[in-house]
Image (cartoon, coloured by chain):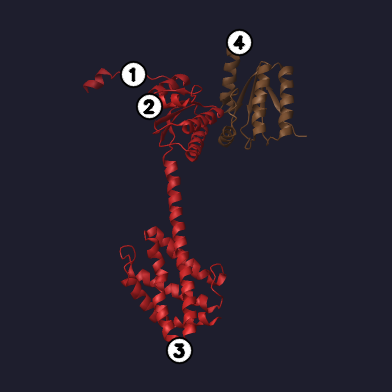
Amino acid sequence: MEKIPILRMGRFLLVTIQIDMHDRLALQLQDDLTDRIVKDRAHGVLIDISSLEVVDSFIGRMISNIAAMASVLDARTVVVGMQPAVAITLVELGLSLDGVRTALNVDKGMALLREEVEAAGRV
Amino acid sequence: MPSATTALDRALANEQEVLAEWAQLQLASTTLRTDLMKDSELREQSREFIGLFRAALGTGTPFSMSSSDWSGVRDFLAGVSRSRALQGFSPSETATFVLSLKQPVFVRLRKLLENSTSELADALWAATTILDKLALFTTEVFQKSREEVINRQQQELLELSTPVVELWNGILALPLIGTLDSARTQVVMESLLQAIVRTGAAIAIIDITGVPTVDTLVAQHLLKTVAAARLMGADCIISGIRPQIAQTIVHLGVDLSAVSTKATLADAFIQALRKTGSSLAQGVKPASAAHA
């Protein structure tokens, strides 16, 4: 079964979604990611969705759920690389992902994540 | 071949003569636009039309707009209408091109079928039906071409009215002019998001100085744009809010508290600079330069 890899970069976890998300895959990611946050004691999660070209309301909610769960586990989440079409779709669906921090690319996302974690006093 | 169409074909048999008479009629007609079209061009078009028309009649296929035997006539007329629509002819002037053929045809039919009134009536009816349908077709194509022009202009207007300007490294400005409706919001959103990707901007200033009124719908569209930009990782500042508009927004109960708003583009720019960690200093002219 296909799986979305979760990579560890120091204190952060890096999730790159390279394939089209379907519902089961999203649920699987939710399971895996929460497990890894606890196991690796991660301080932050960076989700790169630059290859994601199609979203529906389920995937949109999944992203904000993952962010909320990570936040419960005291890890910050930044979503990076959203395609313009995806952003427009999410807004039209009424999902503005209010609790999720966003950045344009992985570079800026990492900087934001570091800032956030430092601000939270978890260096 | 039904006898009525045969008669029609025979009426057109002397092509040169019909052509000369038809061209004469068109040139004499009040709907002739010598300013838009040369006589020679008109004659050429008339000649080509009669040729195609006779060829289609000769196949013996009953007249039908969709039949392949009549496609030559149809395509030719479509071309003529389209070019006339673009040249600035009116619909009736365009339809007259086909309709004016009636007179020479009827005159000939009458001469040919002098002895049989019923046959003459049949032939006239057949000729009228065909020419009327062709004339209607030219009007339809004419209308369609005009609509295409209007659509294209609308598209151009949309694109023209939503420029995204790069103000500073990482700061974009989006001066909006005119009312925001759903279609425009879509274009604005798309061009803004694409510009964010292209320039890697972290802050976008949406300036609504040129937006005449802000109602709940416009506000909702603005908030959508802001939300979409935020999803891409860019912060938005809304600037250029006139006093009247500030009042309307509050009266309508629109909640803009989630977005940072500024009265002028200058204020928004200063805030954007601060956020990106840049600053501007008032330059002092070097003394030597002042003397030089």
Q: SS class of the residue under badge 3?
A: loop
The type of residue carrying mark 1 is: Gln
Q: Is residue B171 above or below residue B282?
A: below
In front of the other: A16 or B177? B177
Q: Chain of mark 3?
A: B
Mark 1 lies on residue: B282
Mark 4, mark 1: which one is toward the viewer? Answer: 4
Residue A104 seen in the current view:
no
Mark 4 lies on residue: A121
Q: Quadrant of the N terminus of chain B?
A: bottom right
Circle 2 Cα neighbour tier, 10 Å, few/some/many (<14 / 14–19 / ≥20): few
C-alpha gap between disc 2 and disc 4: 45 Å
Q: Chain of mark 4?
A: A
Q: Quadrant of residue A24?
A: top right
Circle 2/circle 3 CB separation < 8 Å: no
Mark 2, mark 3: which one is toward the viewer? Answer: 3
Q: SS class of the residue under badge 1?
A: loop
On the image, the x and y values in percent for residue B81 come to 43, 63
